[in-house]
């Protein structure tokens, strides 16, 4: 594999430092460097089975393995590669007693939220229910506290504005949530890392044993690690760590990611060395100039300056609009014009701050007949009909999975909350030695259809693809009356069955896709490839396009109004915009519009509320071509209606 000088220095390092941090700027070839390191280590005699690669998505791990297979051949399958959650769960499944996870089922965020909602209803009285935090917010509190390694009480005091009464109620909900998970043998996302850390820290010999399985641990996207993941790496640091990431792309604090894990790497691991990758292969220099300027304006020293291997190109455009409707219409018109000039739709990416922020733009694309896909919304496994089938599988695998049973049972006619709860209670109270079918026959006589579906899945637990197909076959009549556009939805279940072919058993499949849901776009459901991509910035890392539109880059959005006054949050907002800018290969078009609630236009400049920061407020004019559209009654010039002024 051909590497440049920066990549070679990192990938072929043979010095005295045990641990390496590679600060890889956007588009500088971090994946190539990781792959180069693996190939170098194998060439130097490291047994391929002694390598561990940790990534943040299953897709990233798969892509690396595919690229490695070209050089290493079939031996590549001996490399352990996957997400932190998959790795930890794989270890815990081998020795479950060491971590206390015997017979526990992994649940996704929706299930966790449902469980918290049930407990919230038990704990909070009618007087407080309206103003008390909703289940999703409560789950965030519980998750963030655990991932940041903070007691829930301490997190609530320091990071929320809840009064003492509400804090006490949240702590009660947290305790009951943990108890209910234990009773129902559930593992949520955070438990996987938390229990793994707990197991290896209370048993140093176990940590040494696990760390000793590997000579080198390679970590991708190091800037996204949270305190729990850092503790895992520290515990396994008898192996050599090779961590690659970019502190300027640390944008997931809302998930618990700790910026300090990469920014303070050398202080935390003194026996280490740091390399920088600053040669950008993706963008032209003009795009990098505005990206570099954005980082340089920070009070944090990111200590990097990207240079374009490709050299000079087109200067970025900064375009002002009076309204979001003008902004969306212009983008649609620009796309049509480019298409008429023989450009491909797929050469264009529209980066938005959130799914909500994309709605107006999506409307304009639909009106213009422009084909597009949205990335960053509902994933395949979050679709209701898919979750129904997976809940059938989970119920068949775990009779104590209360949430799965309730959802599955309610898919059937004449079964509501009360009946479902009664059946589940019977299952939970029954002797574990008694068969599920016997308990169900006592609870719901004459409903063999419900019983047969569960038994069919149980019989196919070692053939996950057939189990999914069978589940669809036995439930399809219910689904046809339950969901509109069923033919389209049925394709999702068939896709799920195809994906399940890769797994040896149903439990492994359900756990893998619960941990790392597959989005519709990742599964390549859309037959037409020539599409404009509309994508949230938080979903865009690792992507690129020849032409990128950064939509809505205005005050109140960059930084987001909710972050104002919090230095760390504002700084993360800067990194979000940096990630957006650095997706562009050839052209960067930054658009912004007036917002009557925060901003007024005066000849194209913004008048802001006092003290409200805006990242592009002092943007040097030579870095962009500044344009204005939609002012007054004319577009870009004097109006013929000005002649009416002479009338008076």
Image (cartoon, rainbow, N blue to C red):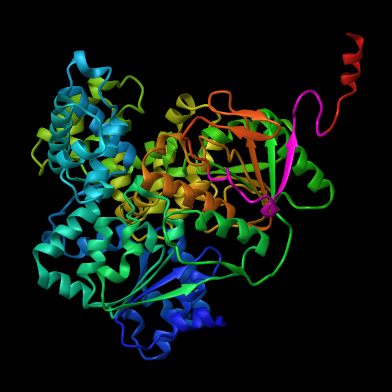
Q: Is residue 209 at all visible to an observer of this figure?
A: yes
Instruction: State the residue at coordinates (59%, 38%).
Output: 552
Instruction: Indicate the quadrant containing the N terminus: top left, top right, bottom left or bottom right.
Output: bottom right
Q: Is residue 134 magenta?
A: no
Image position, residue 396 (x, y; %): 27, 43
Q: Nearer the viewer, residue 422 or 331?
A: 331
On screen, residue 65 above or below 492: below
Q: Nearer the viewer, residue 534 or 635?
A: 635
Q: Nearer the viewer, residue 109 or 15?
A: 15
Instruction: State the residue at coordinates (36%, 91%).
Output: 45
Image position, residue 518 (x, y; %): 45, 50
Residue 204 left/right relative to 248: left
Q: Is residue 582 at all visible to an observer of this figure?
A: no
On screen, residue 642 above or below 210: above
Magenta part of the protein: which range? 615-636
Q: Is residue 619 magenta?
A: yes
Residue 181 left/right relative to 448: left
């Amino acid at each position: 594999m051909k590497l440049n000088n920066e990549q070679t220095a990192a990938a072929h390092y043979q010095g005295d430092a045990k641990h390496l941090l590679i600060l890889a700027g956007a588009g500088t070839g971090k994946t190539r460097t990781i792959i180069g390191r693996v190939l170098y280590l194998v060439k130097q005699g490291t047994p391929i089975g002694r390598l561990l690669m940790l990534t943040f998505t299953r897709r990233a791990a798969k892509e690396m393995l595919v690229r490695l297979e070209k050089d290493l051949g079939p031996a590549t399958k001996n490399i352990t590669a996957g997400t932190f959650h998959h790795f930890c769960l794989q270890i815990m499944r081998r020795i479950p007693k060491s971590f206390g996870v015997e017979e526990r089922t992994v649940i996704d965020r929706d299930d966790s939220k449902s469980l918290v909602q049930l407990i919230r209803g038990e704990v909070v009285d009618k007087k407080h229910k309206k103003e008390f935090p909703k289940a999703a917010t409560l789950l965030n509190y519980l998750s963030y506290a655990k991932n940041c390694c903070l007691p829930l009480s301490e997190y609530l005091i320091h990071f929320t504005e809840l009064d003492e009464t509400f804090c006490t109620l949240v702590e009660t909900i947290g305790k009951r949530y943990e108890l209910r998970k234990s009773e129902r043998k559930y593992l949520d996302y955070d438990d996987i890392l938390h229990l793994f850390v707990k197991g290896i820290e209370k048993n140093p010999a176990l940590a040494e044993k696990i760390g000793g399985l590997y000579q080198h641990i390679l970590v991708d996207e190091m800037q996204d690690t949270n305190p729990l993941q850092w503790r895992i790496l520290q515990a396994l640091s008898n192996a050599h760590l090779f961590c690659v990431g970019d502190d300027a792309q640390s944008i997931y604090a809302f998930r618990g990611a700790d910026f300090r894990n990469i920014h303070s790497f050398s202080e935390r691991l003194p026996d280490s060395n740091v390399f920088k990758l600053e040669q950008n292969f993706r963008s032209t220099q003009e795009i990098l100039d505005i990206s570099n300027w954005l980082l340089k304006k920070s009070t944090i020293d990111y200590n990097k300056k990207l240079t374009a291997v490709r050299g000079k190109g087109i200067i970025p455009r900064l375009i002002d609009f009076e309204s979001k409707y003008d902004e969306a219409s212009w983008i649609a018109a620009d796309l049509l014009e480019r298409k008429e000039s023989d450009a491909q739709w797929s050469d264009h990416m529209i980066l938005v701050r959130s799914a909500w922020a994309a709605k107006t733009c999506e409307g304009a694309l639909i009106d213009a007949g422009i084909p597009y896909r949205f990335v960053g919304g509902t994933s395949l496994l979050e679709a209701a009909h898919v979750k129904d089938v997976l809940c059938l599988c989970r119920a068949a695998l775990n009779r104590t999975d209360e949430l799965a049973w309730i959802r599955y049972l309610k898919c059937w006619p004449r079964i509501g909350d009360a009946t479902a709860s009664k059946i589940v209670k019977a299952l939970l109270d029954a002797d574990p030695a008694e068969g599920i079918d016997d308990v169900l026959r006592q609870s719901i006589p004459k409903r063999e259809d419900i019983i047969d579906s569960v038994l069919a899945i149980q019989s196919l637990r070692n053939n996950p693809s057939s189990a999914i197909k069978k589940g669809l076959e036995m439930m399809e009549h219910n689904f046809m009356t339950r969901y509109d556009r069923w033919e389209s939805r049925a394709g999702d279940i068939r896709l799920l069955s195809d994906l399940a072919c890769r797994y040896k058993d149903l439990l492994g499949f359900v756990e893998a896709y619960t941990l790392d849901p597959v989005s519709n776009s990742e599964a390549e459901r859309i037959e037409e490839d020539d599409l404009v991509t509309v994508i949230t910035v938080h979903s865009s890392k690792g992507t690129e396009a020849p032409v990128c539109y950064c939509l809505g880059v205005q005050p109140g959005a960059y930084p987001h109004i909710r972050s104002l006054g919090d230095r760390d949050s504002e700084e993360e907002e800067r990194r979000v915009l940096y990630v957006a800018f650095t997706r562009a290969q050839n052209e960067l078009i930054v658009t912004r519009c007036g917002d009557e609630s925060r901003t007024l236009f005066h000849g194209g400049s913004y008048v802001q509320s006092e003290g409200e920061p805006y990242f592009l407020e002092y943007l040097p004019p030579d870095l962009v071509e500044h344009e204005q559209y939609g002012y007054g009654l004319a577009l870009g010039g004097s109006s013929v209606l000005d002649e009416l002024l002479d009338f008076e």
